[in-house]
Image (cartoon, rainbow, N blue to C red):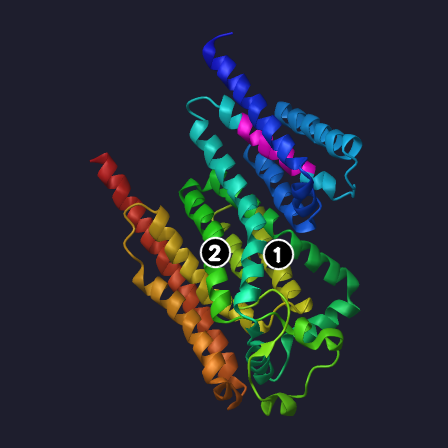
Amino acid sequence: MNAVLLRRWAMSVGVTALLLWIASRPTFYASTILSPFLGVALLSIFLILLRTRRDLRELCVVALLTGTQYYLDVRLLSYPFKLPVLISFLGIAGLATLAIRAIWASEADRRTAYLTLIPAFLFVASEWFADYFLVWGERVRPKTLDLYLYSFDASLHIQPAFLMGQLFVKAHSFATVSLLVYLALPVGIGLVFAGCVMRDRANAIPAVVAFLITGPIGACFYMMFPALGPVHIFLAKFPWEPLTLDQVRHLFLEPIAVAGERNAMPSLHAAWIFLVFWYARKLSLVERIGAGAFVFFTLCATLGTGEHYFVDLIVAIPFTLTILAISQMISVRGMPVPWAALGSGVGGTLLWFGLLRYANHFFWVSPLVPWFACACTLSLGWYCAGGLERGATNAESLEAEAVTV
């Protein structure tokens, strides 16, 4: 056996053993393997593996490693077992297999292999660290601005979160599907990223950057406008006992002390799913339809669970535009600073914060005012996103011409 083969075998065994060891640590098992949301995040790695290559040998490796992890953790170490744990085991095995693929890849395939492996790992790592930001946010901002958001929603002369919550109670199947899609957000992110790797390579790196920076940047905005969602304010009264419009109109708006994670404004779930839809635009028809379904059911779940106000989803639009602009600046070579998109994104988000906090009464002049503000935000966001796409296309054309010359 020559030195190259020996090194590859040693690296493959070492990476596999390291991942199996990490997954068998008591703290990691309790916080990650048993977590439904992190389990889905790990499952997305396995789906990335399948989307980028369907290889019977790799599937055999995944099956072997999944069985080994089950034997170590459940049989030998007697850790608690639930059926979703198998999803986490499958994800760990998928990550190990992606690493092995990269180690054994030929020179021609190595770039694709690492382009698949590294983002897949970072997606899950970012989910794992998210809880620490949220716990820190609750300590830093003990009071929330939920009443201001609730007032805006009521100024629409309907209360979308309460209406969707009531629909969830009545239509159990619809609620179940929406919640499953909501929890499967990492799957949508992983599949669209893998689709970009296979069919739209120019957008693969921008997609990775966008998905990864959304969390940290969003956490900063959480601190500017801390909020939880109506279910945390109304508790058992949600969704059947909202205040009347007259009561909300005369509601005294002030920061209130409420326990919980400050992760409502803007809705990062909405922002991530908007990004999924955006980066799926050049993929297959099936993938585009799937991305559209993810958007619909995720937005329904954000409201139906009471975790968000309707305005959280609206403010997610300029926030998403901010993420797209920053991502393209970082990852597209020759891309000039997209001042229009960046300014509209950051400015639009901060403008909403200011109006909601200091000029909330303005939205009660007429129901047309808040609806018009929402429509303008959606239209401006879509227009500026189109400008970003044209700018990226021009930058790629100039780069190609320079290489040709």
Q: Is residue 318 left or right of residue 162?
A: left
The residue identified by callout 1 is: 293
Residue type pointed to by label 1 = Ala
**Closest to the observer, 100 or 377:** 100
Q: Is residue 91 left or right of residue 282?
A: right
The residue identified by callout 2 is: 216
The residue stretch that appears in magenta: 89-100
Residue type pointed to by label 2 = Pro
Question: Where residue 347 sits in the image (x, y, percent)?
Answer: 38, 70
The question of residue 97 being in magenta is answered with: yes
The question of residue 197 being in magenta is answered with: no
Label 1 sits on a secondary structure element that is helix
Mark 1 closeness class: few <14, some 14–19, many ≥20 residues within 10 Å: some
Question: Where residue 221 sits in the image (x, y, percent)?
Answer: 47, 65
Please say whether residue 263 is visible from this viewpoint: no
Query: In the rendered image, which quarter is residue 110 located in?
Result: top left
Mark 2 closeness class: few <14, some 14–19, many ≥20 residues within 10 Å: some
Question: Where residue 290 sits in the image (x, y, percent)?
Answer: 60, 51
Hey, which residue is sitting farthest left in the picture? 405
Q: Which of disc 1 and disc 2 is earlier in sequence?
A: 2
Question: Where residue 202 sits in the image (x, y, percent)?
Answer: 40, 43
Q: Would you say the magenta stretch is mainly helix, strand or loop? A: helix
